[in-house]
Image (cartoon, coloured by chain):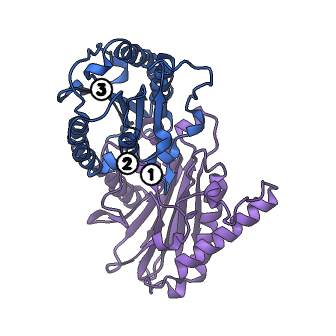
Amino acid sequence: MNERNLPGGEMSSRILDFFWIADCSGSMNGEKIQTLNYAIRQTIPDMRKEADANPNASIMVRAVKFNDGAQWHVPTATVIDDFDWVDLTAGGTTAMGKALELVAGELKQFPTDTKRLPPVLVLLTDGQPTDDFKKGLDELLATPWGKKAVRIAIAIGKDVDLAVLEQFTANAELVLEAKNPQLLVKFIKWASTVVKNVSAPSVGEGTAGAIDINTIPVALDDDDEIW
Amino acid sequence: MSGKAKFAAIGSVVTGAIHLRNEKPCQDALFLRAEKDFAIACVADGHGSDKCPYSDEGAAAAVKIAADILAEMLPNLGDHKDIHLPKRIESEWKKQIEQVHAAAGREAPKGAEFPYILYGTTLLAAACVKDFIFALQIGDGNMLMVDKKGARPILAVAENVGEDTESLCLADAWAFVRTQIIPRSGRAPALFLLATDGYANSFADSSGFLKVGTDFFNIWQEEGLDVIAENLEGWLRKSSDKGSGDDIAMGVMTWQ
C-alpha cells in the first residue's frame, strides 16, 4: 500500500462518560459511607484494565455528592488512568433532585452526535429525596444524553424509596438492593463493568437493552440483612 | 466524454479492531454491482450484541436482497414516495431469515413472533442511474454525495445520540426506512459513498467524515478510482484501529 495520509479529518477514540452520584446524607454515616468509599476505590483497577483492553473507548469519570445540596466531588471528566477516589463523609439531608440537575447541566453540554458512547450514571442512596426529585429527573431526561444514558441505582439498606429509583432507571431490574456491605461492594463493582456493554447497539429497548442483566450479582438466601 | 454516463462501484469491508481483539467475526456486509447503465452499492451493520448472535448473517442477507430488489425496480425508482420497496425489502429479508434459521437447525421460535432480533441489522442502499441517485436507509450509518462543490450528507438524522438504532428486525421495519432521490446536476462528475457507522464514529467530529468525501473525490479526479480501490481496505483498517474500533463496510460509486 502506498504511504499516504488517511482520508478525512482528525481521528479519535470514542468517549464513555461515567458518573458516580453518591448520597452523603446523615443516614449514610458509618459503615455505609465507608463501604461505598472502599468499593468505589476497588473498581478503579478493573476499570483501568477495561480501558487498556479497549483502546477505542476513553473512559472518563466524574462524581457528584449530595446531602443538603449537590456538589461535584470530581468535577472534571477524568481519564480512568488518572482517576483517584477521595473519601466522602456523610451528614445532612438527601437533595437527590439537585444531584440529577447537576448531572443534567453537564450532559446538556455534550454534542448530539454519535461519536460519544452513551453515558453511564450510577446513583447510590440509602434514603428518600428531601427535595424536588421529579424536577431533577425531568431535567435529566430532557437532555438527549440523559435519556440515552445507562441509568443504574443502588439502594443501600431498607429505607430507600424504590419507586423513586425505578423512575430514575426506568427499569426495575436496574435497581439493585444492597442489604449488607458485601452486596454493596458487589453491586458497585458490577455497575462499573457495564462500560463493556454500552458500545453494542441495542434495538428498540433504549441503551440499557445492551446490558446483560443475568450478570447482576444476586443476594443469597443466607446473606445477612444488616441494613 | 461521450455523453453517456459511466458507472463504477468499489468497496471494502474490514473487521473492527474490537472484534479482532475479542476474536469475534465481522458483523458488517457489503454488496456492489456496476453495469453499463447503473451502479448499486449496499452496506449493512449487524448489531453484534448478545441479543443478536447471527447479525452477521442478517447483514449479509440484507445487502444482497436490497441490491436485487433495487436492480429489479430500477425503472420505477423515480417514485420515491412508493412504500412498496421498503415493504418488499423487509418482507423478503424476514422470509430469508426464517429459511436461514431453519436450514441451520437452530432452535425453533417459542412464541408466535419469530425472533428476528437474533439477526438484527441496519441497511444502507443506493442505486445510481443516469439522472439521479436513489438512496435508502434504516438505522445508523452515513451517506455522502460529493461533487466539485463539496460533500453533503444524505438521509442524515438531525439528532442521533447513543447506540439505540432502528433495524430491519423491528416489527413494521418498513415504516422506519428513509428514502431520498438526489437528482444529478448537469453532467458533472460525482461520487456517492455509503458506510456503516464505524467509519464516521472514528473521527473526532462530523467534519472529519465529510472530509473523507472530498478527499475521495479529489483522489478519484487526480489519480483515478483504482488508487482508492487499492488503498481502501488499509484506510478502513487504520481508521478502525485509531478510531471507533468497530467493523466498517463502505461502498463508493462514481459516475461521469
Q: Which of labels 1 and 3 is toward the front?
A: 3
Determine whether, in the image, residue B79 is placed left or right of residue B49.
Answer: left
Q: Mark 3 sits on what residue?
A: A23
User: Disc 2 and disc 1: Cα gap in Å?
Assistant: 7 Å
Disc on the earlier residue, 2 or 1: 2
The first of marks 3 and 2 along the sequence is: 3
Say which amino acid is labelled 1: Gly
Tags 2 and 1 on a common chain = yes
Q: Would you place residue A64 above or below residue B207 in this image?
A: above
User: Residue drawn at (31%, 45%), measured in percent from left and top?
Assistant: A146
Q: Are marks 2 and 1 in contact (CB under 8 Å)?
A: yes
Residue at x-position 58% and y-position 59% = B30
- Helix, strand or loop at disc 3? strand
User: Which chain's residue wears label 2?
Assistant: A
Q: Is residue A85 visible?
A: yes
Evaluate whether label 3 is on the same chain as label 2: yes
Q: Which mark is residue A148?
A: 2
Instruction: Give me the C-alpha separation between circle 3 and circle 2.
Output: 23 Å
Q: Amino acid at mark 3?
A: Asp
